[in-house]
Image (tube, rainbow, N blue to C red):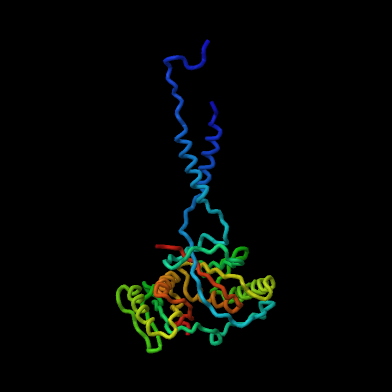
Amino acid sequence: MLNITPMLDLTFQLLFFFIVNYHPSALEGQMDMALPVHSENKAQTPDQVQEINPATMQELPADLTVLLKTQNGGEQTGMITQIIVRDRAGDTNITVDDKFEALEKYLAKAKEGLTNKEDIKIEGDSRLKWYYIVKVMDVCKKAGFKIGFGPPPDLG
Amino acid sequence: MSHGPSHGEVNCDPNLTPMLDLVMQLLMYFIICVNFVAEEVPQEVSLPPSQGARPIDKSEGDVLFLNLDSGGNLIVFGQKPWNLNDLSAVTDVKYWLDKRATEAKKDDNGNCRTSIIIRADKSSDYALVYKLMQLCKEKKFNRFKLRANIVG
């Protein structure tokens, strides 16, 4: 009869190794972003690096901008406290309790009357957490927009 | 003298075959699931969940991973972390990005086809993520991907 004890020992050691090194992590995915090309810079040393001038940066030609506000200090710092959708007609405040659902409905409706039905711009307050920006990106993506980002409005 | 089992004795060796089958199956499962570090991804960056994230396209050519942790540190494989709240660190980042862009263009006849992959922690401030995007944009990187955990 074949002696399988050494094979079993080895198999258990392998099994133990893989169990110890097993770290199940959430499945990572990616989202596309469209950013325009900026003029070329050719710094050779750190001294030659030029400061970014926000006024010369190109913006996506979006008809709609979603402005996300947060508290600067207090319990809700970093969370969305107000969502405003800006279009050519002016600002619309999304006031319903479930802001994300309300935003999705608003965007779907607003899209019909837009010249540029593809692009949307998101501008969040500087201290807003990235988690909430991604949530709003999901909503905009569901409504069928390509997403761009604008500078934090509270930084001027 | 006889050593083998004689008539009427019961063979009490356990049947190891089902256990072996099970152990082998478990082993196969763990071998398949094992995920050795293949990308430049630090564990301290906790990505936000997203319903709109697509599975990663592994056929991407040259990629540059930029990891931003919750403290505003830009973590790049092979470099010491830069804190984006620190102005001198930002200047260093610009210089380093400039060098990477120049190298990428040299390798590809003047075109910068390197994809920037931004892995920002869910607790990062928007201002820092935006600053990072602007820095890359300024250095003529024009292929961007954002990473998030797929949900739903």
Q: Residue at x 48, y 78 (%)?
A: A149
What is the x, y in percent for residue A16? 51, 43
What is the x, y in percent for residue A26? 46, 59
What is the x, y in percent for residue B146? 50, 69
Q: Residue at x 56, y 68 (%)?
A: B66
What is the x, y in percent for residue A118? 45, 79
Furthest-top residue in this view: B1
Give the image quarter of residue A85.
bottom left
Q: Residue at x 58, y 70 (%)?
A: B115
Q: Is residue A76 above or below residue A57?
A: above
Give the image quarter of residue B106.
bottom right
Foreground residue among A45 and A150: A150
Asked if residue A115 lies left or right of residue B67, the reply is left
Furthest-bottom residue in this view: A89
Foreground residue among B96 and B101: B101
Foreground residue among B4 and A40: B4
Foreground residue among B146 and B68: B146
Asked if residue A109 lies left or right of residue A50, the reply is left
Q: Is residue A77 visible?
A: no
Give the image quarter of residue B86.
bottom right
Q: Is residue A53 above or below residue B85?
A: below
Q: Is residue A112 above or below residue B101?
A: below
Q: Is residue B29 visible?
A: yes
Asked if residue B50 lies left or right of residue B134, the reply is left
Q: How many marks?
A: 0
